[in-house]
């Protein structure tokens, strides 16, 4: 990938064992980057590492719950110790909610979704920033969602988590723009991944949301989302900072 600035770069991709994360990890490796594949699923992470290595690339897997500070620290330290630093952080790991309206969300669902979708990216960002600041350069790309742009694309917990992730993205962009660090996000629409939605069709939330989901349009391939992630991390996006990029076949425009 000529002019991408990714040749030899040290990149962390969370949720890298499947779906959008896997596609992003493969694209970064194809551009010459060295990739830390972080995922709670050890088999998935190791399989992606093997795929990258079979193609002649460099990668290493880290397994664990990314909302645990110790695991977040391990991911960053692994990138620094194995690949000599950290140039790109992709906060992609996430979980879906049950499409529940606020009155029906359990404490357990709320805490799990917020922990994985918002707290984990924060912990990883906080751990990564000192290394990027020391280098005077870095790119953070967060996987938000169409649900970060509206209230009609998911349940209360997921919607709140992704709106929060957009706020984190913009805050980091403003706070560290003078230090050479960029933070952007993609907002995927419907995408073919392994994430499943365990929703009760008779529930208030799913019934309301069903009125709007017809606007989703064509489902994206995971690699289409990955292409946007790699672009935002690359030198081609050197003056793009604090942006939330819909990758949704025009759903945000409806």
Image (cartoon, rainbow, N blue to C red):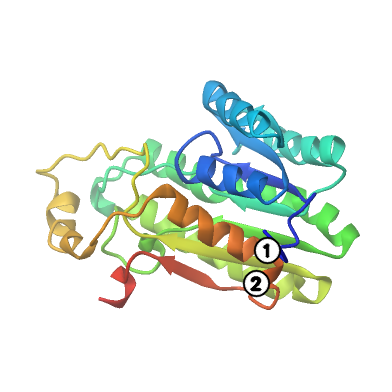
The image position of residue 222, as x and y in percent, is: 42, 48
Residue 115 visible somewhere in the drawing: no
Q: Residue furthest right?
A: 134
Position above or below: 238 against 10: below
Q: Which quarter of the rendering shows the N terminus?
A: bottom right
Residue 76 relative to residue 84: left or right: left
Residue pictured at 88% horizontal, 59% vertical: 135
**Badge 1 local density, few (<14 within 10 Å), some, or many (20+)?**
many
Residue 57: x and y, percent? 71, 37
Question: Which residue is label 2 attached to?
Answer: 237
How many callouts does the rendering have?
A: 2
Which residue is situated farthest in the top direction here? 43
189 in relation to 91, above or below? below
Circle 2 packing at 10 Å, graded few (<14), some (14-19), many (20+), is: some
Percent position of residue 123, x then y? 67, 47
* Left or right of residue 124: residue 137: right
Looking at the rendered image, the quarter that the C terminus falls into is: bottom left
Q: Are marks 2 and 1 in contact (CB under 8 Å)?
A: yes
Q: Nearer the viewer, residue 193 or 123?
A: 193
What label does residue 234 carry, if any?
Answer: 1
Q: Secondary structure at mark 1?
A: loop
- Location of residue 52 (image quadrant): top right
Which residue is painted at 68% across and 63% down in the image? 234
Instruction: Give the secondary structure at mark 2.
Output: helix
- Give me the C-alpha separation between circle 2 and circle 1: 6 Å
- Image-based side of 245 in relation to 194, left or right: right
Q: Nearer the viewer, residue 204 or 231?
A: 231
Question: Which percent across, then down, holds residue 187?
Answer: 44, 62
Q: Residue at x 40, y 44 (%)?
A: 110
- Taking the spot 54% from the left edge, 63% from the top edge, the residue there is 185
């Amino acid at each position: 990938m000529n002019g991408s600035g990714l040749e030899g770069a040290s990149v962390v991709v969370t949720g890298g064992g499947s779906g959008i994360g896997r596609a992003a990890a493969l694209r970064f490796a194809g551009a010459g980057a060295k990739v830390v594949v972080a995922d709670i699923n050890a088999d998935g992470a190791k399989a992606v590492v093997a795929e990258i290595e079979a193609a002649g690339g460099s990668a290493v897997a880290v397994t664990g719950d990314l909302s645990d500070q110790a695991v977040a620290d391990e991911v960053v330290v692994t990138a620094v110790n194995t690949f000599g630093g950290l140039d790109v952080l992709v906060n992609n790991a996430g979980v879906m909610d049950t499409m529940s309206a606020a009155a029906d969300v359990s404490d357990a669902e709320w805490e799990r979704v917020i922990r994985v979708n918002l707290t984990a990216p924060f912990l990883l960002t906080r751990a990564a920033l000192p290394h990027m600041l020391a280098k005077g350069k870095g790119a953070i790309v967060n996987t938000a969602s169409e649900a970060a742009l509206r209230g009609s694309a998911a349940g209360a917990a997921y919607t709140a988590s992704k709106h929060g992730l957009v706020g984190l993205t913009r805050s980091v962009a403003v706070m560290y723009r003078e230090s050479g660090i960029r933070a952007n996000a993609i907002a995927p629409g419907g995408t073919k991944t392994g994430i499943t939605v365990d929703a009760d069709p008779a529930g208030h939330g799913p019934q309301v949301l069903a009125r709007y989901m017809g606007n989703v349009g064509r489902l994206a391939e995971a690699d289409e989302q990955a292409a946007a992630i790699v672009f935002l991390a690359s030198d081609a996006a050197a003056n793009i900072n604090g942006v939330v990029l819909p990758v949704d076949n025009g759903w945000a425009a409806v």
